[in-house]
Amino acid sequence: MILLTIFLRKTFIGASIIAMAQNREGASLVGINTNRVTMLTFFIAGALAAIGSSLTAPINLVFPSMGHLVILKAFVIIIIGGMGSVPGAILGGYILGFTESIGATYISNDYKDLIAFILLVIILTVKPQGIFSRGEQS
């Protein structure tokens, strides 16, 4: 994640990806090849997903719907950290992991997955935009 943050903030390609995320037409107007950046972004996302799934598969059973809970927890992490914030996603992952570990230790391991969604409700109630939100952009 640290390498991804450095890549997005310090390279021209990363700046192009961020520009496309904010305004595709504006990025095209300043000379960014939007089709190429889109393909590169999908390639990076696919490579990161392949790395993550190859590290997860030896630990868990492999079956067609094995990613549903992971995707829901990733959504919770994104909401906790704030949309569009890589450091927020890192901190959100740590918060969720720590909370689930504490809950599994002191409450019950059966409720470990439920704790993620309880945490989501609490965060949405207290700070709906997330911990590291960037505020409203026009």
Image: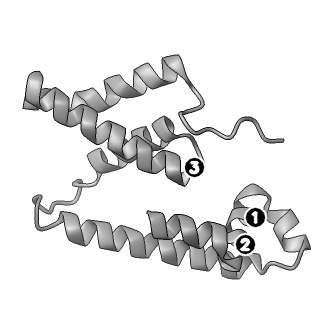
Report the Cα–Cα distance between label 3 and label 1.
14 Å
The answer to whether mark 1 and mark 2 are in CB contact below 8 A is yes
Q: Secondary structure at mark 2?
A: helix
**Image coords of residue 54 (percent x, y):** 23, 72
Q: Nearer the viewer, residue 31 or 38?
A: 31
**Badge 3: few (under 14), some or many (20 or more) residues near its Cα, within 10 Å?**
some
- Name the disc covering residue 67, or none: none
Circle 1: residue type: Ala
Quadrant of the drawing holding the N terminus: bottom left
Q: Residue at x 85, y 72 (%)?
A: 28
- Name the disc covering residue 19, or none: 1
Q: Nearer the viewer, residue 10 or 103?
A: 10
- Name the disc covering residue 85, or none: 3
**Image coords of residue 4 (percent x, y):** 50, 68
Report the Cα–Cα distance between label 1 and label 2.
5 Å
**Image coords of residue 21 (percent x, y):** 70, 59
**Badge 2: few (under 14), some or many (20 or more) residues near its Cα, within 10 Å?**
many
**Image coords of residue 86 (percent x, y):** 53, 54
Q: Residue at x 47, y 48 (%)?
A: 89
When the figure is inspected, residue 22 is found, relative to residue 16, above or below; the finding is above
**What residue sits right under mark 2 in the picture?**
16
When the figure is inspected, residue 135 is found, relative to residue 90, above or below; the finding is above
Q: Residue at x 72, y 72 (%)?
A: 16
Mark sitting earlier along the chain (3/1): 1
Report the Cα–Cα distance between label 3 and label 2.
16 Å
Mark sitting earlier along the chain (3/2): 2
Circle 3: residue type: Ser
Q: Secondary structure at mark 1?
A: helix
Circle 2: residue type: Ser
In the image, 17: left or right of 31? left
The answer to whether mark 3 and mark 2 are in CB contact below 8 A is no
In the image, 98: left or right of 104? right
